[in-house]
Image (spheres, helix red, strand yellow):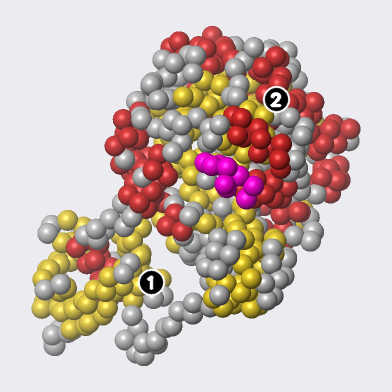
């Protein structure tokens, strides 16, 4: 038994654990890096201790320092959350050897399932089908390329350690194999300290369905399945529970396989068994294969909690204290349907590259579950995962749950960093998503429609203009004696809108653009257009955000600013995102070919390779490995051959 727990993580999962711990009477200890001093998870815990390190990320990975703090604070247990240390068998073993309780499975189970190649061998021996692939020890380039050719393209290169899409690359032909292999290894080494990979056959119409399991070390039960097929960069974006189109036979077969996987290794605590499913002809009980097991709580666990009414974190604490599971398999049932949308600080219009900055405005909906670790004023740094929040909806059926999610996303407001909010909102309106026809390639195949700017409505333009002239919705400056008139230019995307505002009467204004005039009336404490309230909007310096089924950004031209002539230098190679220079492949004066790697950037646990735009000579590289750069920074100069 223990009465205090140290939470060895940050962000929304640390907040989530702290809330349940307090609910069941446990005291909590937070650890944090210097950049997280004012973070939400720090304020939620009873005690908090900074871990100094050379980088903020490394502070949360300082195993010995974390264990030392747990001892000093008399915390009897350590909860690793997910990611970071949750699937590190070495850390779990150290915690146990220190006489503390690790909130998770035995380190031996983590070790078996933490290596994808060993896990697949163990599952195959247990009679669970696995995807054709190579999981051998020979990691030479030639051997891996030979195995890929033998399996047949397309193939997936996957890091044997970890998860979350890190160290994973889809290879469509042999020509790209070695380049993508090198990239996968580098990312895997950075994320997991292990650059070993395996090769798998890529399923052409894949669905990603996983089963939530819970074990007590002897036996295990399941809490049904989740569909996690909607992904970008092999990382989940929108999940739902239960899986659409799931049949009783398929559910029985898949859940039985998941329970078998857990019991085979004597699993204790919460875990997820992930399967790849061939969805080309509906869900069939003989068309799913074991992919991996995540020996931890999953990011998407809230949707399981929503349909079962079970607090999985509370169950984790119970099992860690040696208590039996609260319910048996026959006692667990599903109620309704649930969706989870992950909001990331990233730019879907620029290859989903992460974004950083200060959160200057934040508003979450009230009628759905929101798991988040951010607050207004927080800095989104390049050191950690870019996930900002999870919006979780529930409904009596799939249609109502999706409708509730759509409404919640429409009401969500995040200003200060680029996000995928518009993409998520557009997903809820996608015809295939509505019909439950989901698969892992859906976002990539529909990327232009999902990320494209919808036509800007007159209402949105009027709302933006009025937000400029009257930042407070309940106030507008007017004159009793003279007719006023104002003109501004608003920029939205590549469009310039010239707007004129006049006020013919005390409670009326007229806004004109594109040759039309629109009358607005002030009544009941708000401005209305054609009898309806305008969309919500807010002005931030020279930007105006209109919240209208997604966020529309308008930029204001300063009437006193003389326009500057901008000239794009073709001799510049600019950073596509903020991040750290992790590798440099060339030197000053080198000749490179179009598409050749110049350097790699690392941010928010992903690696991005900067390549030569043409055959050219590199004049100078302006940074060294370890330097941090901002988006748009000139990385190097080149001259064309």
Q: Specify start and end residues of the magenta stretch as a single range.
A: 171-179
User: Is 94 within the magenta?
Assistant: no
Depth check, mark 1 against mark 2: the one in front is 2
Q: Which mark is residue 543?
A: 1
In this view, 227 is above or below 187: above
| Disc 2 target residue | 119
In this orientation, does residue 11 appear? Answer: no
How crowded pointer 2 is (Cα within 10 Å; few <14, some 14-19, many 20+) is rated as many
Residue 67 spot, x, y in % from top left? 84, 43
- Distance (Cα) linking label 1 and label 2: 51 Å
Q: In this view, does 490 lie to the left or right of 12?
A: left
Q: Nearer the viewer, residue 217 or 452?
A: 452
Identify which residue, 531 or 3, lies in the foreground: 531
| Residue reaching furthest to the front | 641
- Asked whether residue 537 appears in the rendered view, the answer is yes
Contact, mark 1 vs mark 2 (Cβ under 8 Å): no
Front-most of 335 and 563?
563
**Vertical side of 312 occupied by 617: above or below:** below
């Amino acid at each position: 038994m223990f009465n205090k727990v140290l939470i060895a993580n940050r962000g929304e999962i640390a907040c989530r654990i702290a809330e349940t711990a307090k609910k069941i009477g446990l005291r909590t200890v937070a650890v944090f890096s210097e950049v997280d001093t004012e973070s939400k998870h720090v304020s939620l815990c009873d005690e908090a201790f900074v871990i100094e390190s050379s980088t903020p990320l490394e502070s949360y990975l300082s195993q010995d320092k974390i264990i030392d703090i747990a001892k000093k604070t008399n915390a009897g247990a350590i909860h690793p959350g997910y990611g970071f240390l949750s699937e590190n068998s070495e850390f779990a073993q150290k915690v146990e050897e220190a006489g503390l309780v690790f909130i998770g499975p035995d380190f031996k189970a983590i070790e078996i399932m933490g290596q994808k190649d060993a896990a697949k061998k163990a599952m195959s021996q247990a009679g669970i089908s696995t995807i054709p692939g190579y999981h051998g020890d020979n990691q030479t380039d030639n051997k891996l390329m030979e195995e890929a050719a033998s399996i047949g393209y397309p193939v997936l290169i996957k890091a044997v350690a970890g998860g979350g899409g890190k160290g994973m690359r889809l290879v469509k032909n042999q020509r790209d194999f070695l380049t993508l292999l090198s990239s996968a290894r580098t990312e895997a080494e950075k994320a997991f300290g292990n650059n070993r990979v395996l090769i798998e056959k890529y399923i052409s119409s894949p669905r990603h369905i996983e089963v939530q399991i819970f074990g007590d070390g002897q036996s295990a039960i399941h809490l049904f399945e989740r569909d996690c097929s909607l992904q970008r960069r092999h990382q989940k974006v929108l999940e739902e529970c239960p899986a659409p189109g799931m049949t009783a036979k398929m559910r029985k077969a898949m859940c039985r396989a998941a329970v078998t996987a857990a019991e085979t290794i004597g699993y204790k605590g919460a875990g997820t068994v992930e399967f790849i499913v061939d969805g080309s002809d509906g869900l069939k009980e003989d068309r799913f294969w074991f992919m991996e097991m995540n020996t931890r709580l999953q990011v998407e666990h809230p949707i399981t909690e929503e349909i079962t009414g079970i607090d999985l974190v509370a169950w984790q604490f119970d099992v860690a204290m040696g208590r039996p599971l609260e319910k048996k398999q026959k006692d667990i049932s599903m109620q309704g349907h649930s969706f989870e949308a992950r909001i990331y600080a990233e730019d879907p219009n620029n290859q989903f590259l992460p974004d950083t900055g200060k959160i200057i405005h934040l508003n979450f909906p009230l009628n759905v579950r929101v798991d988040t670790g951010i607050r207004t004023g927080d800095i989104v740094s390049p050191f950690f995962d870019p996930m900002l929040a999870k919006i979780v909806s529930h409904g009596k059926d799939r249609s109502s749950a999706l409708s509730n999610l759509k409404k919640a996303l429409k009401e969500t407001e995040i200003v200060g960093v680029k996000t995928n909010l518009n993409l998520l909102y557009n997903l809820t309106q996608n015809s295939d998503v509505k019909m439950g026809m989901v698969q892992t390639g859906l976002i990539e195949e529909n990327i232009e429609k999902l990320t494209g700017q919808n036509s800007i409505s007159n209402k949105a333009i009027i709302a933006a203009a009025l937000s400029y002239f009257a930042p407070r919705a309940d106030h507008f400056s007017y004159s009793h004696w003279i007719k006023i008139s104002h003109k501004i230019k608003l920029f939205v995307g590549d469009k310039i809108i010239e707007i004129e505002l006049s006020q013919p009467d005390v409670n009326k204004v007229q806004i004109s653009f594109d040759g039309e005039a629109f009358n607005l009336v002030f009544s009941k404490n708000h401005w209305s257009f054609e009898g309806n309230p305008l969309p919500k909007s807010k002005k931030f310096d020279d930007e105006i955000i209109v919240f209208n089924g997604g966020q529309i950004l308008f930029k204001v031209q300063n009437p006193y600013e003389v326009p500057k002539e901008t000239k794009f230098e073709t001799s510049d190679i600019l950073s596509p995102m903020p991040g750290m220079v992790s590798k440099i492949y060339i030197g000053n004066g080198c000749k490179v070919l179009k598409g050749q790697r110049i350097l790699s950037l690392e941010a928010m646990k992903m690696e991005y390779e900067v390549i030569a735009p043409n055959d050219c000579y590199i004049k100078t590289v302006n940074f060294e490995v370890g330097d941090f750069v901002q988006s748009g920074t000139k990385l190097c100069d080149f001259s064309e051959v």
